[in-house]
Image (spheres, grey):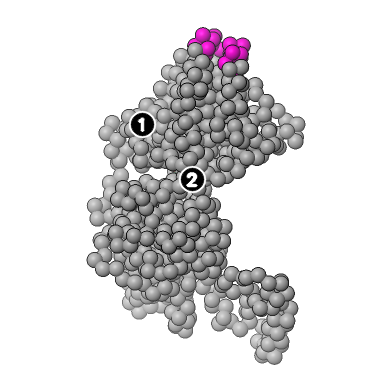
Amino acid sequence: MRVEDIRSPEQIKSMSVKELREFATDIREFLIRSISQTGGHLSSNLGIVELTLAMHYVFDSPTDKMIFDVGHQSYVHKILTGRAHKFATLRKKNGLSGFQKRKESEHDCWEAGHSSTSLSAGLGMAIARDLKGEHYEVISVIGDGALTGGMALEALNDIGALHKKMIIIFNDNAMSISKNHGAVEKRITNLRSSPLYRTVKKDVKTNLNHSKTGLNVLNSLTHIRDSLKENLVKAPLFKEFGLDYLGPVDGHDIKALIKVLETAKEHDGPIVVHVVTKKGKGYPFAEQDKLGKWHGVSPFDPKTGQSLIKLCTDELSWSEVISKTLIRLAFKHPEIVAITPAMANGSKLLEFARLFPDRFFDCGIAEEHAMTMAAGMAQGGLHPFLSIYSSFLQRAYDQINHDVARMDLPVVIGIDRAGLVGDDGATHQGVFDIAFLRSIPNLILSQPKDAKEAQNLLYTAFMTNAPFCIRYPRGTIPYQKNEEFERIKIGSWTCHIVGMPETILITYGPDVDRIIQKAKENSIGLMVVNARFFKPLDTKLLDTLIKEKLPIIIYETDIKAGGLSSAILEFMSKYDERIKIIGIGDHFVDHGSIRILRKEEGIDMESVFKELEHYEHAPRSSSDRSL
Ligand SMILES: Cc1ncc(C[n+]2csc(CCOP(=O)(O)OP(=O)(O)O)c2C)c(N)n1
Ligand SMILES: CC(=O)[C@@H](O)[C@H](O)COP(=O)(O)O
Ligand SMILES: [Mg+2]
């Protein structure tokens, strides 16, 4: 059967192990051919081909629920559930999503994009199933990278306590996007190589090899099960959470996988199946990659592995501009350190890591921890740079508020992939950070319009003793190294006049120069304001602009609600006497009785009625009276 022709997972259930192996080879060829044309997540999918085949062979989707953590490795699941013929549309408008997507297929019971949600989601479904008296399997597939995320560890804690029947397939390829880090990884390494488990593995293999093919595998597994059961309690890491464990199993041996999954299916309560896979399996460039360059790829030539996207030679990605500048500053300032929550390659921090190995920290997929650790480093006298994608920063909202901003600690936060990111879709669009950060006291929140301003803003951030966020988008910009750094006045905007302005346009980021250019080309009189700080605003300039009595357009490339326009409109309300906003100002509120605090903050009844008194004596317009 051609990969493109598969319409249902039922079609693989009649295949022999030999046919499944051949089909795995076809799927790999299909993935390489297809992703080389569209771009997408290559390595993780190449690594999970046999495992996904075995899952669909043993379980019955969509009745049984399959949850792929992050979802970037769900391409084979998509193929087996009848979506191969749509792969040319992968990550394109109205095409296939790069992750599991409920509206795409009944086989996608869950959606993600952010890491480490699969165990909580699986437990939730298992609870729902049991309370409703229903019968199906819940299978969460989680990678060793995703297992470093706090949510996954929180879920294990609860799964061990509630003891619901669910299967956790631990897809262990010793890689996050790049090499996996942390104590969990070390513990797994021990687990993989422990003599006990090697013996069990050999035992499993020997027995499986002697057993018959087909579904009647359980009898032949009795010996293995007994030997595994003896060792279940001794499996480190998972044992601590009270979870039973099977493995490790060779994740490219379909026969062994089918049998171990059959065993797990029979098991009562939660069980971990440890599957060892090779990221990038079957494509040498991807297999050898330790830096994560083949994790997510743009279109490439499958023969040479060369990218088909040609970059302008004088352009660099925004991340590279920031990291080059960081390196320059780090040479002069030994207190500068860099942190990434598992995104060293995407954030372009590999060169920093090479130059300053002792000052570089990849803390795993742990945005919350990364933020609080940065706060601790700042408290200890370092000046950390935490690079974090805008959408993943959502995870660290409490930490940026509670630990960094509240203590007013000098952490520089590089908010990468700010704005629309395109291909990855709804889970990854970095469009909320202005709105969710703007309300946090003490934070400085900025975005450069070009590479020159990016370098100066980063310099300014390190010259400032306060939490300082610089956001920058995906994509590239013309780059020239600034010979000298210039310190930018915090909260200052710039104005650019084209012709005789008839309108004021306030915007930010790379669109500032694009607008100026287009206005010039079309001889449009315009005052373009580069609002390079969202917090604090340039209130002096705003006062001047408002007096110009020209129409004002606020052009945002992020979510409108709560963003720059909200900030400006809040400020402008002071020009309309009929509107008075009462609320807590831009600061943290210390302890005290609620009564005293409300009085101090001007949010008690007395303050409200004082305002009303003021309005009672104010002259009213006729339109007011008609109300
Ligand atoms: C909260 C969050 N942080 C970071 C990422 C980026 N990210 C996507 S996949 C991935 C690595 C996952 O590693 P693993 O779970 O081992 O899967 P593998 O790719 O090795 O199969 C990372 C860091 C993310 N999706 N979500
Ligand atoms: C699945 C995931 O979260 C990452 O792999 C993400 O797709 C990386 O995005 P960039 O390609 O912008 O680095
Ligand atoms: Mg992994």
Indicate which label's residue lies in the foreground, 1 or 2.
2
In the image, residue 579 lies in the stretch drawn in magenta? no
Q: Nearer the viewer, residue 372 or 267?
A: 372
Q: Amino acid at mark 2?
A: Ile
For mark 2, give the secondary structure.
loop
- Left or right: residue 7 compared with residue 473: right
Pick the front one: 481 or 546: 481
Q: Please name the amino acid that badge 1 sits on.
A: Glu
Q: Residue at x 62, y 31 (%)?
A: 243
Task: State which quadrant residue 177 falls in.
Answer: top left
Image position, residue 170 (x, y; %): 53, 32
Is 531 located above or below residue 330 in the figure? below
Q: What's drawn in magenta, residue-wise?
A: 207-225
Give the image location of residue 399, x and y in percent: 54, 57
Can you say whether 3 is above or below 214 in the image?
below
The residue to which callout 2 is attached is 365
Residue located at (59% from left, 69% from top): 588
Lower position in the chain sequence, tag 1 or tag 2: 1
Horizontal and vertical percent for residue 391? 49, 52
Closest to the observer: 110 or 173? Answer: 173
Which residue position holds label 1?
287
